[in-house]
């Protein structure tokens, strides 16, 4: 069957993450993968066995995406734009298929990834903005942005990020390579925007890194405490995890 790649955006607020959740073989929670599976199978006229949509990143509950990548095998050859429009007609309004392209049979959305970019938005208002509460991580304490910027370079490079992996992490190694970390201050919007790029990230890694940066910004941690955390490899030393609502999967790149 032809294989297709799709770039998908979604508002993660009302989803129990990306990955399909089942209990006794029955879907038990609303997920992005579950919604995509339903629509793709509907367009394919409900084949048996059902088509499974494979995602590049298993985002958590409340995490958003501008550029999630998925692939699936489909029994019909459909023009890309027609396919995109058909999917968007059937999908719920909190999911948008941005593009659909035909790919080679050996393309795999998850295993062929080269790099991932995430964005984290921090709201610095003194009270929670009701219109941002699902789309930013709110942190009302005063932050020294210069201290935070000075710490960013300590993440760059290949390190063992065991201190930044949540207890549910199931990867064989906690070594990851980070190639870019940037912080932009949007004064008029009362926001700080962090950008993280790397070859891959551990379970909750970015939210834990954001938590450490926030503690550096308040003065609770020394500016270069990240170096110590990398060295000790102890999750108990970095317990604060920033809220899921501020995190966005921005882009996934592949070696073509």
Image (cartoon, helix red, strand yellow):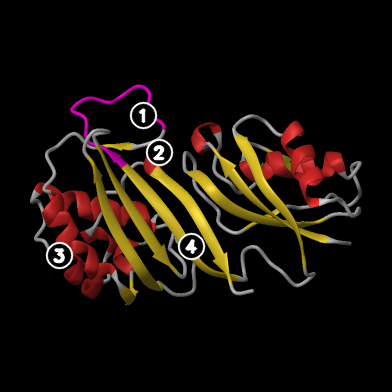
Kind of element beneath mark 2: helix
Of the two numbered discs 1 and 3 in the rendering, the one whose residue sits closer to the viewer: 1
In percent of width and height, residue 120 lies at 36, 48
Q: Earlier in the sequence, mark 3 or mark 4?
A: 4
Please identify the quadrant where the C terminus is shown. bottom right
Residue underneath mark 2: 245
Q: Mostly what secondary structure, the magenta segment?
A: loop
Residue underneath mark 4: 116
Q: Which residues are magenta?
A: 122-134
Label 2, label 3: how many angstroms apart (C-alpha)?
25 Å
Whether the residues at callouts 2 and 3 have beta carbons within 8 Å, the answer is no
Please tell me how crowded label 4 is: few (under 14), some (14-19), or many (20+) other residues with Cα within 10 Å.
Answer: many
Of the two numbered discs 2 and 4 in the rendering, the one whose residue sits closer to the viewer: 4
Label 4, label 1: how many angstroms apart (C-alpha)?
25 Å
Residue underneath mark 3: 225
Whether the residues at callouts 2 and 4 have beta carbons within 8 Å, the answer is no
**Relative to 188, does residue 216 appear above or below in the rendering?**
below
Name the residue located 61 percent from the left edge and 49 percent from the top edge. 19
Name the residue located 71 percent from the left edge and 69 percent from the top edge. 107
Please tell me how crowded label 2 is: few (under 14), some (14-19), or many (20+) other residues with Cα within 10 Å.
Answer: many
- Which mark, residue 133? 1
Magenta stretch: includes residue 199: no
């Amino acid at each position: 069957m032809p294989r297709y790649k799709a770039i998908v955006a979604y508002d993660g607020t009302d989803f129990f993450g990306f990955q399909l959740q089942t209990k006794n073989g029955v879907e038990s929670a609303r997920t992005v993968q579950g919604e995509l599976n339903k629509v793709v199978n509907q367009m394919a006229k409900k084949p048996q066995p059902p088509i499974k949509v494979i995602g590049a990143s298993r985002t958590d509950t409340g995490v958003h995406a501008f550029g999630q990548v998925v692939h699936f095998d489909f029994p019909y050859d459909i023009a890309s734009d027609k396919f995109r429009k058909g999917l968007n007609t059937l999908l719920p309004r909190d999911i948008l298929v941005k593009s659909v392209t035909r790919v080679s049979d050996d393309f795999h959305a998850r295993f062929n990834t080269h790099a991932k970019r995430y964005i984290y938005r921090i709201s610095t208002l003194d009270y929670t903005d009701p219109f941002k509460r699902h789309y930013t991580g709110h942190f009302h304490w005063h932050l020294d942005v210069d201290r935070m910027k000075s710490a960013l370079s300590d993440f760059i490079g290949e390190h063992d990020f065991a201190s930044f992996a949540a207890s549910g992490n199931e990867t064989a190694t906690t070594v990851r390579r980070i190639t870019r970390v940037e912080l932009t201050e949007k004064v008029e919007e009362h926001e700080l925007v962090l950008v993280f790029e790397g070859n891959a990230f551990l379970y909750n890694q970015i939210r834990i890194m954001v938590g450490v940066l926030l503690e550096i910004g308040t003065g609770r941690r020394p500016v270069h405490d990240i170096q110590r955390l990398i060295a000790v490899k102890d999750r108990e030393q970095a317990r604060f995890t920033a809220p899921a609502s501020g995190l966005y999967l921005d882009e996934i790149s592949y070696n073509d």
